[in-house]
Amino acid sequence: MAPHFTLASLDITNLYSNIPVLETKSILKNTLEYHQRDPQTQKELIMWYDVITRHNYFTHNHDIISQNDGLAMGALSSGLIADFFLQHTENTHIARLAHKHRINDYFRYVDDILLIFDPNHSDIQSILREFNALHPDLHFTAETERDYTINYLDISIHKTHELKTSTYRKPTFTHCIIPPHLQPPYTTQVRCCQISI
């Protein structure tokens, strides 16, 4: 990586609740047809999609509310569908944006994106404007490196003559980790404790 390149991160605000369900269904249909899946498989996948996207309910102040658009928070299928929609968006637009803004590297994990770009050809505000114009339902926020360091997910990336990483913990981190055998579907109470490291 050239030393003058800049590190930046983008975050998609409220990803699951902003995924356009009908548009994603249309993308799914086109993808199945493009890959020439048999009609029965196509029918079953579209039925599966309709069931899980039309039956989204949540409670608020003791009221049961039906969610009209977007994906259900916490549903295992939501991550898969959101990623499918984002991959389609990336396949459609990222090559053009990378060329225009001299984005050298693009990495995404769920709704967190890491960019490495040439600041001699673009700036983070121009990049952010273009990302926010990709789709009316997607809203991105951005951060750039400070003192040659950026925090991305649970790592700090330090830019020297090469990229080095270290563990990053948010200020709200409690040092509490739920052991795998106590995670859902089991309903066991876990007490949190602060551990000095």
Image (cartoon, rainbow, N blue to C red):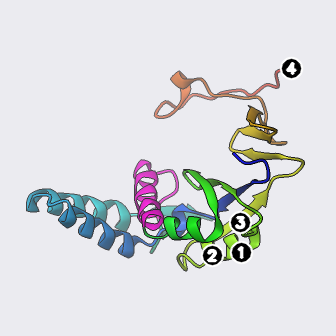
Q: Provide the residue span drawn in magenta.
A: 71-91
Q: Position of residue 39 (x, y in %)?
A: 9, 62
* Amino acid on which disc 2 is placed: Glu
The residues tagged by marks 2 and 4 sit, at their Cα atoms, a distance apart of 44 Å
Q: Residues within 10 Å of mark 4 (few under 14, many from 20)?
A: few
- Secondary structure of the residue carrying numbered label 2: helix
Is 37 drawn above or below residue 171 in the view shown?
A: below
The residues tagged by marks 3 and 1 sit, at their Cα atoms, a distance apart of 12 Å
Return the residue at label 3. Answer: 141
* Amino acid on which disc 1 is placed: Ser
The residues tagged by marks 1 and 2 sit, at their Cα atoms, a distance apart of 6 Å
Tell me which residue sits at (48%, 68%) in the image: 19
Q: Are marks 1 and 2 in contact (CB under 8 Å)?
A: yes
Tell me which residue sits at (57%, 64%) in the image: 98
The residues tagged by marks 3 and 4 sit, at their Cα atoms, a distance apart of 33 Å
Please name which of the two marks, 2 or 4, marks the residue nearer to the observer.
2
* Amino acid on which disc 3 is placed: Thr
Is 109 drawn above or below residue 50 in the view shown?
A: above
- Secondary structure of the residue carrying numbered label 4: loop
Return the residue at label 4. Answer: 196
Quadrant position of the C terminus in the picture? top right
Numbered label attached to residue 130: 2
Q: Position of residue 174 (x, y in %)?
A: 79, 34
Q: Are marks 3 and 1 in contact (CB under 8 Å)?
A: no
